[in-house]
Image (cartoon, rainbow, N blue to C red):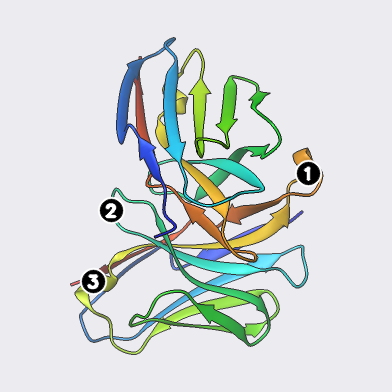
Amino acid sequence: SQTIHQWPATLVQPVGSPLSLECTVEGTSNPNLYWYRQAAGRGLQLLFYSVGIGQISSEVPQNLSASRPQDRQFILSSKKLLLSDSGFYLCAWRERDKKTSGANVLTFGAGSRLTVL
Amino acid sequence: SQQGEEDPQALSIQEGENATMNCSYKTSINNLQWYRQNSGRGLVHLILIRSNEREKHSGRLRVTLDTSKKSSSLLITASRAADTASYFCAWAVGWGKFQFGAGTQVVVTP
């Protein structure tokens, strides 16, 4: 079965420090992978998506970057965190919905909560 | 902006009552999806309705879609305390990307 892991689950970092959030997927190959950010009480903002190793599309200009060094690994990074980078970061992968014979749906990890102080 | 809207933003009901939330979107879609998010957790896919469908049921969930109005609704019947969560609609925009509504926070009290 397919599973998706995110870590760390919780992170408190000072302004100006670096960041690395990791996401790995098991049980599938060549998945489309996504990073979303969710501000408190808000909807999801797509940050990056990747269709394959080394292929990253950025959706919004920001202080963050993403990398995909391996097929099932997706990393979100920052060299210097800002206060505005605080939020709940969600990794997801796209799979075929078994109940609707093929439509694409997203499966999410448990999330990483980042607080920048 | 390709974002949609959901209303209400928050909904508080008692167990046994029905909960209805609405979603509006701005683009043409092939399907519209609903997800649930328990507090502090990732989203879980609930149900998908295709653009050529008007209504779909799954257990206590009922989804409607009106493509002429670019709107969808999610009805949860006979709510339980365990239904307390935020609910999001989502749709594909461009190739392989998904846009989410702002969400409706539902609180079901015993």
Image coordinates of residue A16 in percent, x first then y, are 23, 86
Residue in front for this viewpoint, B6 or B77: B6
Q: Are marks 1 and 3 on the same chain?
A: yes
x, y percent for residue A74: 57, 76
Q: Name the residue carrying label 3.
A: A84
Query: Residues at badges 1 and 3 in contact (C-beta under 8 Å)?
Result: no
Would you call the spot at circle 3 few (<14 residues within 10 Å), some (14-19), or many (20 or more)? few
Which amino acid type is shown beneath numbered disc 1? Answer: Lys
Q: Earlier in the sequence, mark 2 or mark 1?
A: 2
The residue tagged 2 is A40
Q: The residue marked by circle 1 belongs to what chain? A: A
Seen from this angle, which residue lies furthest left? Answer: A117
Q: Earlier in the sequence, mark 1 or mark 3?
A: 3
Question: Which chain does the numbered disc 2 sit on?
Answer: A
Q: Is residue B38 left or right of residue A117?
A: right
Outermost front residue:
B68
Mark drawn on residue A98: 1
Residue at the (47%, 51%) spot, across then down:
B100
View extreme (top): residue: B16
**Residues beneath discs 2 and 1 located on the same chain:** yes
Task: Depth check: give the residue in front, B83 or B88.
Answer: B88
Image location of residue A70, percent across then percent down: 67, 83
Q: CA distance from mark 1 to mark 3?
A: 38 Å
The residues bearing labels 2 and 1 have C-alpha atoms spaced at a distance of 32 Å
Query: Alpha-carbon distance for marks 2 and 3?
Result: 12 Å
Q: Chain of mark 3?
A: A
Q: Amino acid at mark 3?
A: Ser
In depth, the one of A68 and B3 nearer the eye is: B3
Q: Are marks 2 and 3 in contact (CB under 8 Å)?
A: no
